[in-house]
């Protein structure tokens, strides 16, 4: 099952009496192991990177992400993210 400290988007029913969560069967174990657990781990690594601060923390988070292939790509990804004008404060935090 998904831990209580993990937020997920779920469909709900909204009517005149309020918002009602829909009931679902538990996810199959294969889906939990191969899809959900890796995403939760990336979430934990992202949180650790934020709490630690510094560029090295970002690097450590991204190097284990399956979407990055090598250290050059990780560095380019960090540079691209931190150079976005809306991320000025983030760039100061992760220098």
Image (spheres, rainbow, N blue to C red):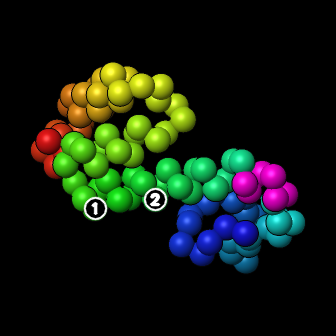
Q: Is-magenta flag for residue 81?
A: no
Q: In this picture, is 24 found above or below 37?
A: below
Where is the N terminus found, in terms of image quarters? bottom right
**Residue pictured at 33% horizontal, 22% vertical:** 72
Q: In the rendering, which numbered label is found on residue 44?
A: 2
Tell me where residue 86 sits by quadrant. top left
Q: In this picture, is 21 found above or below 51?
A: below
Camera sees residue 77: no
Q: In the rendering, which numbered label is found on residue 51?
A: 1
Instruction: Report the front residue among 10 and 16.
Output: 10
Instruction: Report the front residue among 91 and 20.
Output: 91
**Residue pictured at 76% horizontal, 64% vertical:** 13
Residue 90 as seen in the image, left or right of residue 2: left
Residue 92 as seen in the image, left or right of residue 86: left
**Residue pictured at 28% horizontal, 62% vertical:** 51
Numbered range of the magenta stretch: 28-33
Camera sees residue 41: yes
């Amino acid at each position: 099952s998904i831990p209580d400290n993990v937020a997920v988007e779920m469909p709900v029913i909204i009517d005149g009496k309020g918002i009602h969560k829909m009931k679902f069967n538990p996810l199959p174990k294969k889906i939990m192991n191969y899809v959900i657990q890796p995403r939760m781990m990336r979430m934990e690594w992202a949180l650790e990177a934020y709490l630690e601060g510094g560029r090295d923390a970002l690097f450590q988070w991204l190097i284990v992400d399956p979407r990055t292939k090598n250290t050059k790509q990780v560095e380019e990804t960090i540079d691209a993210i931190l150079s976005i004008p809306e991320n000025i404060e983030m760039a100061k935090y992760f220098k």
